[in-house]
Image (cartoon, rainbow, N blue to C red):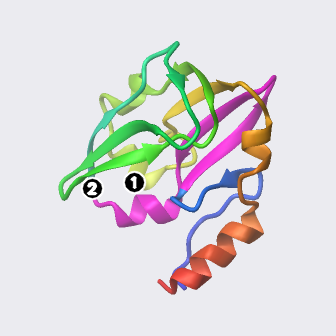
Amino acid sequence: MANYIVPNDLRYTKTHEWAKDLGGNKFRVGITDYAAKHIGDVTYVELPHIDDELDKDEPGCVIETVKSSEDVYNSIGGTVVLENGDILNENPEIINSDPYGEGWLYEIKAKSADDFKALMSRAEYEKLLEELGD
């Protein structure tokens, strides 16, 4: 397996998104290092708007690369309270180099913390990566 960064303080999805608990039922969302290394060079990000209501498992935003356009699925149902357009509109490629830092996508106020609790732990996500045999 290739070496991918998998922070311990995040939760993960099978479709390679991450969520970070910010407290107060707010969560920051992005794509994993695995996804960032596999999608190609990011050229544009279509982010959700503040106050958008997003359901769990629906596309939350779209990442365009030199190769394709990829939906990023929302893993936590709720209301978008912040998006990272200030950085990503000018430097979308930061997602490739810093997906857990400057390359985050948006923050959501969850209807329930249950969606976050249902996501994979670091160990579970690392096992998924091993199974992919990359």
Q: Nearer the viewer, residue 71 or 36?
A: 71
Q: Quadrant of the N terminus?
A: bottom right
Magenta stretch in the rendered image: 17-41
Q: Nearer the viewer, residue 29 or 112?
A: 112
Question: At numbered mark 2, what does the secondary structure look like: helix, strand or loop?
Answer: loop
Per the rendering, the mark at residue 19 is none
Quarter of the image holding residue 64?
A: top left
- Dot 1 crowding, Cα within 10 Å, few <14, some 14–19, many 20+: many
Give how far apart the Cα atoms at labels 2 and 1 are.
7 Å
- The answer to whether the residue labelled 2 contacts the one labelled 1, judged by CB atoms less than 8 Å apart, is yes
Question: At numbered mark 1, what does the secondary structure look like: helix, strand or loop?
Answer: helix
Rendering coords of residue 49 (x, y %):
43, 18
Tell me which residue sits at (47%, 27%) in the image.
84
Vertical position of residue 111 compared to residue 16: above or below: above
Rendering coords of residue 79 (x, y %):
59, 20
Q: Residue furthest left?
A: 66
Per the rendering, the mark at residue 96 is 1
Tell me which residue sits at (60%, 83%) in the image.
130
Q: Nearer the viewer, residue 81 or 99?
A: 81
Tell me which residue sits at (37%, 32%) in the image.
88
Does residue 21 belong to the magenta stretch?
yes
Per the rendering, the mark at residue 41 is 2
Rendering coords of residue 89 (x, y %):
31, 28
Rendering coords of residue 57 (x, y %):
54, 44
The amino acid sitting under disc 2 is Asp
Tell me which residue sits at (75%, 37%) in the image.
21
Does residue 33 belong to the magenta stretch?
yes
- If you read the primary sequence from the N terminus, does the residue marked by circle 2 or circle 1 appear first? 2
